[in-house]
């Protein structure tokens, strides 16, 4: 069976760090971890976003060199190829590394040296989005952005992530203004755990082109109407929502309601090493839970093409590949 060709728009590079690679990097960097693989695996039980973020940031202690960042990126692309990913817009959290003393150039160079050959090596075109940590000061985000611009980092855009509640988009207006003035696209996590008001702020104050998660938008029908009327995409991550207890089970996920209401929804994996699956697993989970047809799956894949920052000449062949898949079902 051929795999549906996919565009992935919501995936954190750091969230692809698999437990085995954690131990491999620790050994290479002479770091003694105070637990074994089985014990680490037992920690992958989350009660909310913060309980996940605590482990996500802690595990990064083994990622230190350009080679580490390159290996992490390559491991993701290898798995993404299997998942049928044809284009990815990859999130990177620079402050998760600079805050522990890793130079910005180390992570940017390690990641970008692999991404620049992603198409020829893996058949996956790629671009990079620097995401700022909303639970750290906006001034720090602005300093990192300034450094990224000065070093001419190969970015398509900027985003906003980490602990949401209590850290509204409004705090980051200046950061996003500077990014936009420098030709960068803008996205932001909003409405994952935070209220619809944060989605409004992301749209009106940060002027984002798409909203990451956005699932709580459903609580505000005026907001849903606005998202539909303006065809603002939501990058939904079903398995993440289950594992972070945003919804109880996959069967409770509001994806069908989102589609019924005409929202431009895309399917993504968020942090696949933590949430039990890559983007193909997320597609399979919603297909099975909601008995989605090939037409509906193709619509989700097409939505991601239209929500991407790809130029028109790259979109047309991807849409043709998706149509070929649909017609073959
Ligand atoms: N960083 C990595 N994954 C995240 C998520 N699901 N929400 C917010 N920040 C994140
Ligand atoms: Zn995310």
Image (cartoon, rainbow, N blue to C red):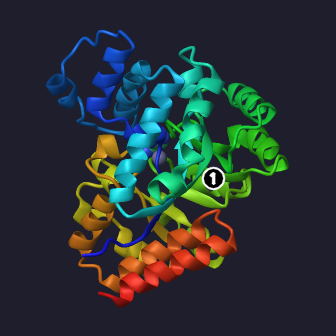
**To which quarter of the image does residue 204 belong?**
bottom right
Q: Can residue 125 be seen in the rendering of this structure?
A: yes
Rate crowding at label 1 as few (under 14), some (14 to 19) or many (20 or more) other CA atoms within 10 Å: many
Q: Residue furthest left?
A: 38
Q: Name the one closer to the observer, 251 or 81.
A: 81
Which residue is pictured at 23% across the width and 36% down the height? 45
Placement of the N terminus among the 4 image quadrants: bottom left
273 displayed left or right of 291: right
User: SS of the residue at dot 1?
Assistant: strand
Where's residue 116, x and y in %?
Answer: 60, 47
**To which quarter of the image does residue 107 belong?**
top right
86 displayed left or right of 290: right
Q: Residue furthest front?
A: 120
Q: Name the one closer to the observer, 223 or 258.
A: 258
Q: Name the one closer to the observer, 293 or 213.
A: 293
Q: Is residue 34 above or below residue 106?
A: above
Q: Look at the numbered disc 1 and say if its residue's Cβ is closer than 8 Å to ligand 2.
A: no
Which residue is pictured at 59% across the width and 73% down the height? 306
Marker count (numbered) = 1
Q: Is residue 194 above or below residue 222?
A: above
Q: Is residue 100 above or below residue 147?
A: above
Which residue is pictured at 51% across the width and 40% down the height? 164
Q: Residue furthest right?
A: 181
Where's residue 99, x and y in %?
Answer: 57, 19
Tag 1 residue: 187
Where's residue 311, x and y in %?
Answer: 68, 68
146 displayed left or right of 135: right
**To which quarter of the image does residue 224 belong?**
bottom right
Where's residue 200, x and y in %?
Answer: 64, 57
Q: Can residue 9 be seen in the rendering of this structure?
A: no
Placement of the C terminus among the 4 image quadrants: bottom left
Which residue is pictured at 25% across the width and 11% down the height? 34
């Amino acid at each position: 069976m051929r795999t549906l060709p996919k565009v992935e728009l919501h995936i954190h590079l750091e969230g692809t760090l698999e437990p085995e690679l954690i131990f491999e990097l620790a050994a290479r960097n002479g770091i003694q971890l105070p637990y074994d693989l089985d014990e680490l695996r037992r920690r992958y039980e989350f009660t909310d976003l913060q309980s996940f973020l605590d482990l996500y940031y802690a595990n990064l202690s083994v990622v230190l060199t350009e080679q580490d960042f390159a290996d992490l990126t390559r491991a993701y692309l290898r798995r993404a190829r299997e998942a049928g990913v044809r284009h990815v817009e990859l999130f990177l959290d620079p402050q998760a590394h600079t805050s522990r003393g890793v130079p910005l150039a180390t992570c940017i160079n390690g990641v970008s040296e692999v991404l620049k050959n992603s198409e020829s090596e893996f058949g996956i075109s790629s671009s990079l989005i620097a995401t700022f940590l909303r639970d750290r000061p906006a001034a720090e985000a602005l300093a990192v952005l300034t450094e990224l611009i000065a070093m001419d980092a190969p970015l398509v855009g900027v985003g906003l992530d980490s602990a949401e509640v209590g850290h509204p988009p409004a705090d980051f207006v200046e950061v996003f203004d500077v990014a936009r003035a420098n030709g960068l696209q803008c996205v932001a996590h909003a409405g994952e755990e935070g209220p619809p008001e944060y989605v409004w702020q992301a749209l009106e104050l940060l002027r984002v082109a798409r909203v990451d998660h956005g699932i709580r938008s459903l609580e505000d029908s005026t907001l849903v109407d606005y998202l539909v009327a303006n065809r603002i995409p939501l990058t939904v991550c079903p398995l993440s929502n289950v594992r972070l207890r945003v919804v109880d089970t996959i069967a409770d996920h509001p994806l069908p309601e989102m589609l019924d209401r005409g929202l431009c929804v895309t399917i993504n994996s968020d942090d696949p090493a933590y949430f039990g699956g890559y983007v193909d697993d997320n597609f399979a989970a919603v297909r099975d839970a909601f008995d989605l047809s090939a037409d509906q799956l193709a619509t989700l894949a097409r939505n991601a093409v239209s929500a991407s920052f790809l130029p028109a000449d790259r979109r047309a062949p991807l849409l043709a590949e998706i149509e070929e898949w649909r017609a073959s079902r």
